[in-house]
Image (cartoon, grey):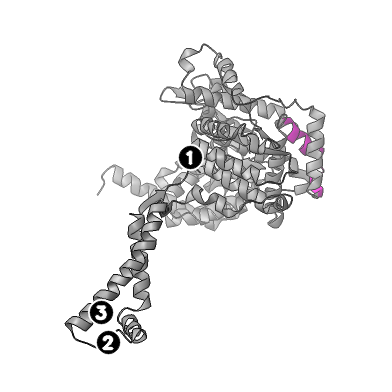
Amino acid sequence: MIFDVWKHEGDALRRTFIRETHSFFKNHEKWKSKYKGTDDLLDDLSKSLKGTTRKPLNFIQLIKGVILLPLSFLILAILTWVFTDKILKLDYFQKDDIAGALTVFLGLFPVAFLFKFAIKFIEDIKGDKVEYIQGKIQDPIEFENKFKQLIKSLNKDIQKVVFVFDNLDRVSGEKAVQIMSTIKTFLDPIDKSIKDKNIVFLVPCDESAIKRHLRKTLNYSKDFRGDDYHRYAGEYLRKFFNTIIWIPEFYINELEELAVKKLEDTKIDDFKNDELSALIVLVFDKNPRQIIQFINILISNYLLIKERPIEGISLKEDIAKLAKYLLLIQKFPDIMDVYKHTLSYDLESLPPELNEEIEGEKRFSEKRVSEFYSFLKLTEHVKIESLDLFFKLRRSDFENKLENSVRLIKLIETNRINHIVKLDESSINEETDKLLINDFEFVKKFNLENKQHELSEIIIEKMRKMSNPILLAKFIDGLLHLLKHKEIELLPKAYRMIYSKLKQHENNISDISSKLLIEECYNKIGNKTEKEKLRKVISRKHIEDFVNAHNIK
């Protein structure tokens, strides 16, 4: 029988164990025919029994009953006769009519009354009742005895019963120690009545985790130096267990065979991928259970994407990339949050926030960052070009048209482009904002050659949805800085959209660099009519600003 202590961590363990054991023996296909226990075995586990008790009649009390009960009936009859015949002068009790007198007597005193009278008389002879309440069993010995009852209810041909207490190392520290004490309650339950049964308790667990639980719970850490607590914890555990078996390490090829076998068992052809199996084995090189669990996670996400195909993801070609992404968010969720919030989609370019300090302490420990570096190095055979697609598992219209466009648009609308283009590689030093350097490298590597059409469509779609004049002005100013920096032009319809928006919100034209507005927008418009319209809008606003600035009336 396997008993999951993690599942029942919040329950009263002794009671739950007894109840689960009885249920297992009673209902399991292989055991129910060999078990004679009934449900009333569990009554005192969860119920309080209420009742009365009284000593049985002794010999003297029996003699009193035999003599006094008939005598009481005789006295009752005589009193009735005296009252009716002598006092009331009635003729119901005539000496020569005994049958009639008896009939009248029974009419006066029904049999039910006489029967109750007799019972009350006997109870008075026996003495007072004593009421009692038998509470639920509490004492460890009571649980041990209850456990023996269960074992005794097994057929004689059952010679060995193995109880497995699983997941002990997963419960909290204090609870783990309590559970071990509970298991001790049921250890060595052998007495003469069940000596033919061999009871075995098996506790699979991580020994080091149990020792850490003991250190925290028993508060012996002050008495130890370094890792001396391992020695004491080992001695403590030996009081519970007769022997210990250590599971041997796995060869890498054994785990690889397991991973390949489990991937084949899914019946998913796209999982027949050497990169995928190698990735799983490299990351989970010691724990077969983690391999199985991760494959289950991979199946769920695979089926999700298969049901709603995503442009840019090929399940056959990119299954190893999907697996690597799932491993990243499983093992480093905190670090992946930084990538999301900073719109950093290149794994090879680490966000500066990983090394930033908050109130004098680093946001991430050196160990944590080192583990992340190691993971990237270990899995470098699977390269994810951009994380943005995996973060959302879908593409917006922007993203479909230009890879990494979300981050680019974010830099434009926050007008960080203005600071980025002013940065020069020769002027970068240790004091330069690391996030700015990161953005500088991103813009520098961002390829817009022959992508004017895609960029124009994105700009048009973005500006069409913008209604806030302040944000619109910042966006146009940032866009113009980018166009000058990359020395590219937009499609004519993109410039028409800029003019249309400026005409609607001309009050904020002053927030846009005049020089760039002329060079990167006005001078790039080929249509003379549209160009003249834009010139009038710009002129009108700048004249108005000049008049207001000099207080001209």
Instruction: State the image coordinates of residue 190 (x, y, percent, origin top left).
Output: 64, 34
Residue 540 in view here: no
Q: Could you tell me which residue is drawn at 35 percent across and 70 percent down?
A: 116
Q: Closer to the camera: disc 3 or disc 1?
A: 3
To which residue does mark 2 refer? 92
- Give the vertical position of 367 relative to 301 (above or below): above
Camera-nearest residue between 250 and 151: 151
The amino acid on which the numbered mark 1 sits, given as a three-letter code, is Asn
Q: Which label belongs to residue 459?
A: none
Q: x, y percentage for residue 161? A: 70, 39
The residue lying toward the viewer, choosing from 304 and 514, is 304
What residue is shown at x 37% (from left), y 75% (from top)?
A: 112
Would you call the spot at circle 3 few (<14 residues within 10 Å), some (14-19), or many (20 or more)? many
Q: Position of residue 231 (x, y in %)?
A: 58, 15
Q: Tag 3, which secondary structure? A: helix
Q: Nearer the viewer, residue 234 or 226?
A: 234
Give, as a single range, the part of the protein colored magenta.
Answer: 269-282
Q: Where is residue 47 drawn, in percent x and y?
A: 47, 51
Task: Report, in whole angstroms, how far the alpha carbon at label 1 lies from the one at label 2.
Answer: 123 Å
What residue does disc 1 label?
415
Camera sees residue 337: yes
Q: Earlier in the sequence, mark 2 or mark 3?
A: 3
Q: Residue at x 51, y 34 (%)?
A: 175
Q: Quadrant of the N terminus?
A: top right
Q: Secondary structure at mark 2?
A: loop
Q: Which is nearer the N-term, disc 3 or disc 1?
A: 3
Instruction: Identify residue for label 3.
Output: 81
Residue type at mark 3 is: Trp
Real-space CA distance between mark 2 and mark 3, rounded to the nearest whole angstrom:
8 Å
**Horizontal relation, residue 109 to residue 423: left or right:** left
Membership of 281 in magenta stretch: yes
Mark 1 neighbour class, 10 Å CA radius: few under 14, some 14 to 19, many 20 or more = many
